[in-house]
C-alpha cells in the first residue's frame, strides 16, 4: 500500500486528524516557533510567550513531548532546571509553524481590512 494513501484526514476516524486539532492551537504554534530558535527552560518560554499561563504552558509542553515534537532534559543544577528542545520531528513541524507565523505577520492588515469592510456591510444591512 502506498504510504501517502494510508491515511486520509477527510475521513472521520483518521488518526492524522488529531494532528490538525493540536497544531491549530495558538499556544502550540507559538511554543514551536520559540523552540525553533533555541532550547529554552520553562520560565524563559513563559517569558517569551506573553499571555500564556504556567498551567497552559505545562499542559502544552507535556502534549508536545508525548507526540514526539519536543524533548525535555533535566539539568542537574541547583535549583534543578528543565530544558525543552525540538526533536527532529518537532523541527520539521516547526518550520511549517514558522511559515504560518510569517504569513500572519505579513497579511494581518489585509485580514483586518476585510473584517472592517464586512462589518460595515453588515451594519448597513441592519
Image (tube, rainbow, N blue to C red):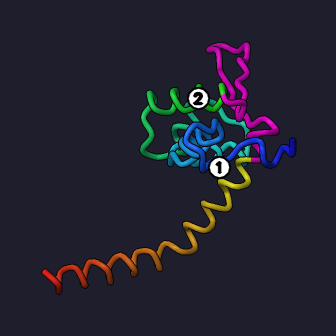
Q: Which residues are magenta?
A: 67-92
Which of the 4 image quarters holds residue 15? top right
* Residue 117 left/right relative to 18: left
**Mark 1 highlights which residue?**
33
For residue 54, above or below residue 5:
above
Q: Position of residue 94 (x, y in %)?
A: 70, 48
Mark 2 residue element: helix
- Asked whether, in this view, residue 103 is left or right of residue 36, the answer is left
Residue at 66% over, 22% down: 82
In terms of depth relative to the viewer, which is nearer, 107 or 46? 107
Q: Residues within 10 Å of mark 1 (few under 14, many from 20)?
A: many
At horizontal 58% and vertical 48% (from top left) the residue drawn is: 29
Count neighbours of disc 2 (C-alpha within 10 A) and say few if under 14, some if 14 to 19, many if 20 or more: some
Residue extending furthest right? 1
Counting from the top left corner in percent of width and height, residue 112 is at: 40, 75
Task: Look at the image and say whether residue 89 sits in the magenta stretch.
Answer: yes
- Mark closest to the chain's N terminus, 2 or 1: 1
Give the x, y percent position of residue 57.
51, 33
Please identify, in this view, whether the residue under mark 2 or under mark 1 is nearer the observer: 2
Amino acid at each position: 500500500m502506498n504510504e501517502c494513501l494510508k491515511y486520509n484526514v477527510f475521513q472521520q476516524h483518521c488518526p492524522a486528524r488529531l494532528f490538525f486539532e493540536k497544531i491549530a492551537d495558538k499556544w502550540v504554534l507559538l511554543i514551536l516557533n520559540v523552540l525553533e530558535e533555541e532550547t529554552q527552560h520553562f520560565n524563559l518560554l513563559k517569558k517569551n510567550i506573553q499571555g500564556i499561563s504556567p498551567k497552559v504552558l505545562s499542559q502544552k509542553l507535556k502534549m508536545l513531548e508525548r507526540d514526539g515534537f519536543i524533548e525535555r532534559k533535566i539539568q542537574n543544577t541547583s535549583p534543578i532546571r528543565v530544558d525543552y528542545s525540538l526533536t527532529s520531528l518537532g523541527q520539521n513541524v516547526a518550520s511549517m509553524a514558522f511559515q504560518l507565523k510569517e504569513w500572519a505577520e505579513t497579511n494581518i492588515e489585509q485580514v483586518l481590512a476585510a473584517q472592517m469592510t464586512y462589518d460595515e456591510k453588515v451594519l448597513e444591512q441592519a
